[in-house]
Image: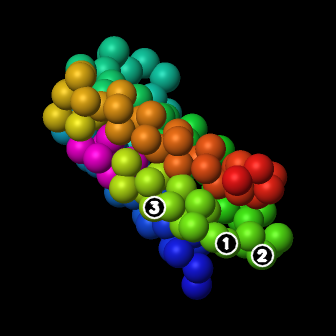
């Protein structure tokens, strides 16, 4: 498996971990019965619970841009320095972003997001043959 596809697998595994964290925090904040039900009348989420939801949403959003590009690169047999570096930057920055988001770090977290976006753009530009 290529490095780019491996980074996509790891990024998907990270999403699974984050969803499990979000579910666990939701049960701790709201209780098992309310979270197992239809959730129509839940009270507003506790701050940390809301943060985990935003983190999952943010990672899912990043994956919706990154995943198709990696798959297109694989199908088009585009794999070079830029696609490998871009994929690695995406994954490792998303791990850092998740840790910073969970700990509530407001200053450095956006930098991790920017690095991930730069990685995605590297893959995009390589697929388009622009770098």
Query: Where does residue 59 sit, x and y in percent of width and height?
Result: 47, 42
Determine which of the numbered discs, if any, sits on residue 79 in the image: 1
Please name whichever residue, 67 or 3, is drawn nearer the observer in this view of the structure: 3
Which residue shows up at 77% across the image and 75% down it? 77
Q: Residue furthest bottom?
A: 1
Left or right: where 83 falls relative to 47: right
Magenta-tinted stretch: 94-99
Task: Specify whether residue 124 is in view.
Answer: yes
Which residue shows up at 44% across the image and 54% down it? 89
Left or right: where 106 falls relative to 91: left
User: How far apart are labels 1 and 2 at the CA level?
Assistant: 6 Å
Q: Residue furthest front?
A: 131
Q: Can you tell which quarter of the image residue 42 is in?
A: top left
Residues marked 2 and 3 touching at CB (< 8 Å): no
**First reached walking from the N terminus: tag 2 or tag 3:** 2
Residue labelled with disc 3: 88
User: How far apart are labels 1 and 3 at the CA level?
Assistant: 13 Å
Q: Main secondary structure of the magenta part?
A: helix
Determine which of the numbered discs, if any, sits on residue 62 in the image: none
Residues marked 1 and 2 touching at CB (< 8 Å): yes
**First reached walking from the N terminus: tag 1 or tag 3:** 1
Query: Where does residue 61 sit, x and y in percent of width and height?
Result: 57, 38
Please name whichever residue, 48 or 32, is drawn nearer the observer in this view of the structure: 48
Determine which of the numbered discs, if any, sits on residue 77 in the image: 2
Q: Residues within 10 Å of mark 3 (few under 14, many from 20)?
A: many
Task: Specify whether residue 30 is in view.
Answer: no
Q: Quadrant of the N terminus?
A: bottom right
């Amino acid at each position: 498996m290529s490095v780019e596809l491996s980074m996509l697998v790891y990024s998907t595994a990270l999403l699974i971990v984050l969803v499990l964290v979000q579910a666990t925090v939701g049960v701790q904040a709201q209780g098992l019965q309310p979270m197992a039900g239809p959730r129509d009348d839940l009270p507003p989420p506790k701050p940390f619970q809301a943060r985990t939801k935003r983190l999952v949403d943010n990672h899912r959003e990043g994956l919706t841009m990154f995943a198709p590009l990696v798959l297109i690169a694989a199908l088009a047999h585009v794999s070079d320095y830029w696609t490998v570096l871009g994929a690695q930057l995406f994954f490792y920055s998303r791990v850092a972003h998740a840790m910073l988001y969970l700990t509530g770090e407001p200053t450095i977290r956006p930098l991790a997001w920017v690095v991930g976006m730069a990685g995605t753009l590297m893959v995009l530009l390589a697929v388009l043959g622009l770098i």
